[in-house]
Image (spheres, helix red, strand yellow):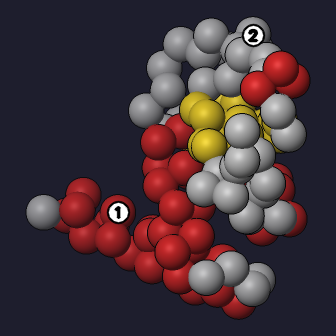
Amino acid sequence: MTRLLAIALMCASMCQTATAAGLTKEYGVKLAFLYKFANYVENTKAGNRNQVTNGILGPDPFGSTLDGVAAKRKARGKTLRIARFAEPSEYTACDILFVSGQYNR
C-alpha cells in the first residue's frame, strides 16, 4: 500500500512538472511512466550498464521536459539517456522505446 501511494505521488509530481512545462496531462502521465519503467531495467542491452536509454521514435511530444527529468533523476542509481529517432532506419539499441502517436510511416 505504501509503495502504491509513493508511485501515485511520484506520478502526480511529474505530471505537475510536465503540465507546468506546457505538456498536456496525457503526456505528463506518459512521461511519468517512462521514468518509472526505467526503474525496472536491470541489465541494459544498449551498451553502458550504468545508464538506461529511453528512445523516442517520431516527433518528440515531451520536448526539453524529458531532458530535464533525465538530468535531475536517476533510475536505480543509473543515469538516464534520451535518444531520439526521426525514422526507424535511425534506430540504435535502447532499453525503452516510446513510439510517438504523431509518427507517420
Extreme residue in the front direction: 105
Callout 1, which amino acid? Ile
Which image quadrant: the C terminus?
Answer: top right
Mark 1 vs mark 2: in front:
2
The image shows residue 47 at horizontal and vertical percentages of 75, 10
Q: Is residue 54 left or right of residue 58?
A: left
Callout 2, which amino acid? Gly
Which image quadrant: the N terminus?
Answer: bottom left
The image shows residue 18 at horizontal and vertical percentages of 66, 77
Extreme residue in the left direction: 1
The image shows residue 57 at horizontal and vertical percentages of 73, 40
Does 31 sit above or below residue 18?
A: above
Residue 104 can be seen, yes or no: yes
Q: Which residue is mark 2?
A: 47
Residue pictured at 45% horizontal, 79% vertical: 12
Q: Which residue is mark 1?
A: 7
- Which structural element holds mark 2? loop
Q: Nearer the viewer, residue 87 or 47?
A: 87
